[in-house]
Amino acid sequence: MNKNNIEDDSELPEYFITANDIPYKNRIAMQAIWQKYIDASISSTVNLPNDTTIEDVYDLYLEAWKAGLKGITVFRDGCARVAVLTTDNKEEDKESDNILNRGYIIPASNNLIGLKRKLVTGCGSLHCTAFFDPESKELREVYLSKGSTGGCNNFMTGLSRMISLSARGGVSITDIIDQLKSTGSCPSYAVRSATKHDTSMGACCPMAIANALADMYKEFTMAEYGMNFSSVKPNKDEEDNCPVCGSPLTFEGGCNICKNCGWSRCD
């Protein structure tokens, strides 16, 4: 377009169709034809306009699943992450403006939205409070406090400070959750899960905190966009949860296994 001095899609000849002009159902139908004759999973990126809603993306993934696709990717124009195809010529400048300088810590604002979860761990109760920035939609601070029946309070104080420092240092909540979920199982957690069956989802305190952060972030973003998926009922496979950590089981290799803690029904 630059070579031919074309500044806008409207100046293209009629026989040119951009990725944003293709209805997503047509993209799904095309990919479904390929997938029918390919054993491995394939994927293509569906480019969506900036005004695409969460409901639209939900319907898109549901339509792809109904069509038998094993994988599909979506990108909404103007999203925080830069795509290969974008209609904003200044996107690169915007992306560079959002990058924090090394060592810079975002000051904690008083204008934050907080959510709280009470967790049950191997050592007792654990209170997890997370604060989110209503403008950037990012996690800013986390406070962890063991209840009167719990221990390791100094460890929880240190962990909450490190999570908060990471969040205000530009680390995304998804990366924080991924690191917390990468920890191993705790003997105390496993014993209480097997005897009292009242522990929060996870195999140790960091995993339980990660799941709580993910749940609170989902609640926060859904509330911000006025969404409520509580009416969506899980299927029977989703109701079959791990007896150790409570995570959904996955049928793989002829056996139900837990991707979260490693429990297997065949062991």
Image: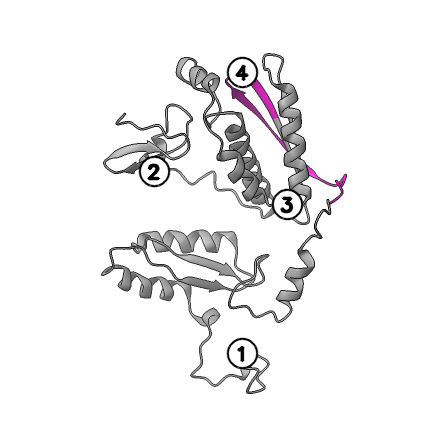
> Which mark lies nearer to you, 3 or 4?
4
Q: Can residue 114 be seen in this view?
A: no
- Magenta residues, start to end: 106-127
- Decide which of tag 3 and tag 1 comes sooner along the chain: 1
Q: Which residue is drawn at 38% across and 63% down?
A: 25
Q: Identify the residue position indicated by label 4 in the image.
A: 123
Residue topped by disc 1: 9
Q: Quadrant of residue 5?
A: bottom right
Q: Nearer the viewer's eye, disc 2 or disc 4?
A: 4
Query: Image height check: is 11 above or below 163?
Result: below
Residue 256 x/y as whole percent:
29, 32
Q: Which amino acid does label 3 sit on?
A: Glu
Along the viewing direction, whichever of 259 and 225 lies nearer the viewer: 259
- Residue at figure coordinates x 34%, y 52% from the top left: 65
Q: Earlier in the sequence, mark 1 or mark 4?
A: 1
Badge 3 or badge 4: first in the primary sequence: 4
Residue type pointed to by label 1: Asp
- In the displayed structure, would residue 233 be above or below residue 12? above
Residue matched to label 3: 138
Judged by depth in the image, the label closer to the viewer, 2 or 1, is 1
| Quadrant placement of the N terminus | bottom right
Report the Cα–Cα distance between label 3 and label 2: 31 Å
Residue pushed farthest bottom? 4
Secondary structure, mark 1, is helix
Q: Nearer the viewer, residue 193 or 8?
A: 193
Per the model, the C-alpha gap separating discs 2 and 1 is 43 Å
Calculate the distance from the C-alpha at mark 2 to the C-alpha at mark 4: 33 Å
Q: Which residue is drawn at 50% across and 17% down?
A: 122
**Kind of residue at badge 2:** Asn
| Residue on which disc 2 sits | 235
Is the Cβ of the residue at disc 2 closer than 8 Å to that at disc 4?
Answer: no
- Separation of marks 1 and 4 at Cα, in angstroms: 61 Å
